[in-house]
Image (tube, rainbow, N blue to C red):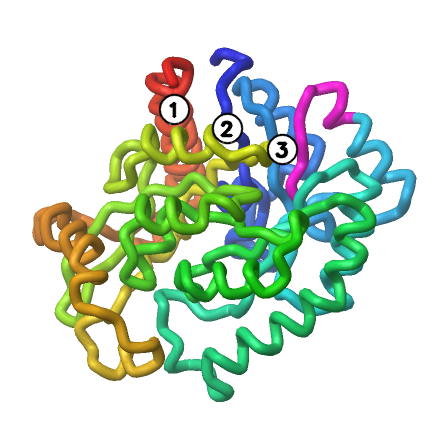
Amino acid sequence: MSSSLRAGLSVYGITYACGFTWAGTARANPNPLDAFALMDLAAGRGLQSVEMPISRMLPDDSPETIRRARDHAERLGLTITIAGGKAQRDHLLQQLEYARAIGAHTVRCVLSGILCGDRRTLPEGWPAVLEAAARELEAALPTAERYQIALAVENHQDATSEDLLGLCRHFESRYLGITLDTGNPLAVMEEPIAFAERIAPYLRDTHLKDYRIYRAENGARLVRCALGRGVIDFPRLYQIFDAQDWPIARNIELGALHARLIPFLETSWWEHYPDRDARDVVPALSLFWNQARPEAEEWRTPLERDDPAEVLAALEREELGASLEYLASFAAAL
């Protein structure tokens, strides 16, 4: 694989390999990748970056251990994105310290823990989540600006493009931006390319993710697949990324091992979103309608079929390899 391949590797696309799947049980990977092995894997496949949570991938967070990880990344020519959690002041400040110590340019964070665009599970309501996140980001942003490290809020199957633009425009700081998960706009009924074009000026980080679509009685399922095997237009996305002045990491994050059921045919799902012109939803609906897979096709992953661990491990390896081959097929020509 060419060392010029403009992509990286996120731990959340290979969760079995990294020991996250079945963690704490007898079925967990007995030899999971740590931060050093993850970086070796990425460099060995000709990648440029890795994304990882420090607390889960290093044996400890001592200055010496983080320094070793930084030196290892520099020797391999890799950049690092810190995979943080929710946008909460103390957590963000800790992640910024990790980022500064390990030489990362970006800390990714999320607004909530909901998935599938299903805001019905939030007792406080979505506007309250946005308001709280703005307060927490405001408290951490001066440190991010001082360290010149971006806080990048992800569209984690919860936020629309307008939600993220609202946060970024409120602060208008070079060091507050967006992590674009390329597949997740579908979870809030937005077309992925239009979503990316809308937020492009604030892009700081990306997760390269593709989905296959399967119809369901109350909406549709988004099912993980290798890049290029689903519905996402990656050549167009790379053009958008290349047009930005921020050095955007492009970490492959293959989808979750559980399919995401988006219940957009349930009226109550929509009640937790602002009113939208029906014409704005048509591009996403078009993908769901025209790209849906045959109903008889098996959509469950090995995890959902309760297959042996070795089958799950083989799936991760095969999909990562196929994704790299796909990216190499077009990225060098852009």
Horizontally, is 185 left or right of 242 in the view?
A: left
Find disc 2 in the rendering and name its residue: 7
Residue type (three-letter) at the residue carrying disc 3: Leu
| Among the 4 quarters of the image, the one containing residue 133 | bottom right
Q: Does the rendering let one see residue 60?
A: no
Image vertical order of residue 68 relative to residue 308, above or below: above
Find disc 1 in the rendering and name its residue: 327
Find disc 3 in the rendering and name its residue: 38
Residue type (three-letter) at the residue carrying disc 1: Leu
Nearer-the-camera pick, 87 or 127: 127
Label 2: how many Cα within 10 Å (few below 14, some 14–19, many 20+): many
Q: CA distance from mark 1 to mark 3?
A: 19 Å
| Among the 4 quarters of the image, the one containing residue 324 | top left
Count of picture labels: 3
Nearer-the-camera pick, 72 or 48: 48
- Choose the circle earlier in sequence order: 1 or 2: 2
Image point 57% across, 33% down: which residue? 245
| Among the 4 quarters of the image, the one containing residue 238 | top left
Q: CA distance from mark 1 to mark 2?
A: 8 Å
Q: Specify the segment rendered in magenta.
A: 72-81
- The reply to whether the C-beta atoms of the residues labelled 1 and 2 are less than 8 Å apart is yes
Image point 31% across, 48% down: which residue? 194
Spot occupied by residue 27 in the image (x, y as percentages of width and height): 51, 52
Q: CA distance from mark 2 to mark 3?
A: 14 Å
Residue type (three-letter) at the residue carrying disc 2: Ala
Horizontally, is 281 left or right of 15 in the view?
A: left
